[in-house]
Amino acid sequence: MLKRAPNLTEQTRLYIKERILKQAFRNGRIPSEMELARALGVSRTTVRDALSKLENEGVIVRRQGAGTFVNPAGLQVRTRLDEVWSYEEVLRAHGYTPAVEVLCLETRPAGEEAARRLGLTPDEPVLLMEKRFLEGDTPAILTRNILPAHLLHCPPDETHVRQPIYDLLATCCHRELSYYLTELVPARADETLAMHLDISVGTPMLAFDEIGYDAQHQPLIWARSWFRDDRIRFRLIRRR
């Protein structure tokens, strides 16, 4: 049975998806709502909501009169662009064993661009955090996060910075990251990116430029991420 928690639907969704990824359902057929509810110790409504989420993700398909089945094409979407996840999860979804290196942890003035993004004045202090995510010895992702210093209840150390950013915000700022406003932008590696990601200067890359907000829509963090194209690919299902 599943451990009861505030978001039982999400637990159920993750459990069913894990079983799908492990090919635990014979012939790709998902058990009925009643069977799943009985096996997991949850209500049929919870199972129905979880299956609806998986259907929206494209992981399963419902066939009238036949039942619910795994959608093989949907399993190719390893990481959904509309969800908040840690980059360790992204690397694991690509079949890698992740490692994290902290490259920078320093306090400095915000400057014009960070001030504009986060609603600060240019001379207000911010915390700059840079991390590199590796697959074995090979760099795959570089992140650069800027956090207003006034949000900090305790100064983070490298142990905090190695955590996913939403955990750092909860631990060190007592704030909850609710969502990101993300822009996907093409980029080319400058000398710094090339050095950190072990690629040639000018290499094309995909980058995320994001502002993270709390539930009251207050900006908490400016986050930028760069991905090695030969290591990380994003896919999504587009519907008519």
Image (cartoon, rainbow, N blue to C red):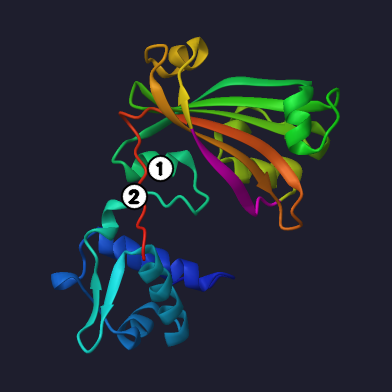
Q: Nearer the viewer, residue 92 or 40?
A: 92
Q: Is residue 180 magenta?
A: yes
Q: Which residues are magenta?
A: 176-185
- Left or right placement of residue 87 versus residue 36 in this view: right
Image quadrant where one finds the C terminus: bottom left
Q: Which residue is mark 1?
A: 90
- Residue 58 on image: x %, y %: 33, 64
Secondary element type, mark 2: loop
Residue appearing at x 41%, y 79% in the figure: 47
Q: Main secondary structure of the magenta part?
A: strand
Examine the rendering and report whether any part of residue 153 can be seen.
Answer: no
Q: Quick check: is 109 in the magenta stretch?
A: no
Give the secondary structure at mark 1. helix
Badge 2 amino acid: Arg
Left or right for 175, reference 1: right
Give me the disc on residue 196: none
Who's the residue at 37% across and 15% down the image? 199
Determine the image quadrant of residue 229. top left
Dot 1: few (<14), some (14–19), or many (≥20) neighbours within 10 Å?
A: some
Question: How many other residues sit within 10 Å of disc 2, few (<14), some (14-19) or many (≥20)?
Answer: some
Residue 43 rendering spot, x and y as whole percentages? 45, 85
Q: Amino acid at mark 1?
A: Val
Q: CA distance from mark 2 to mark 1?
A: 8 Å
Mark 2 = which residue? Answer: 78
Above-or-below relation of 230 to 179: above
Residue shown at the point (42%, 52%) measured from the top left: 80
Q: Between residues 238 and 37, which one lies in front from this camera angle?
A: 238
Residue located at (72% from left, 40% from top): 172
Position of the N terminus by quadrant: bottom left
Image location of residue 181, percent across then percent down = 61, 47
CB-based contact (under 8 Å), mark 2 and mark 1: yes
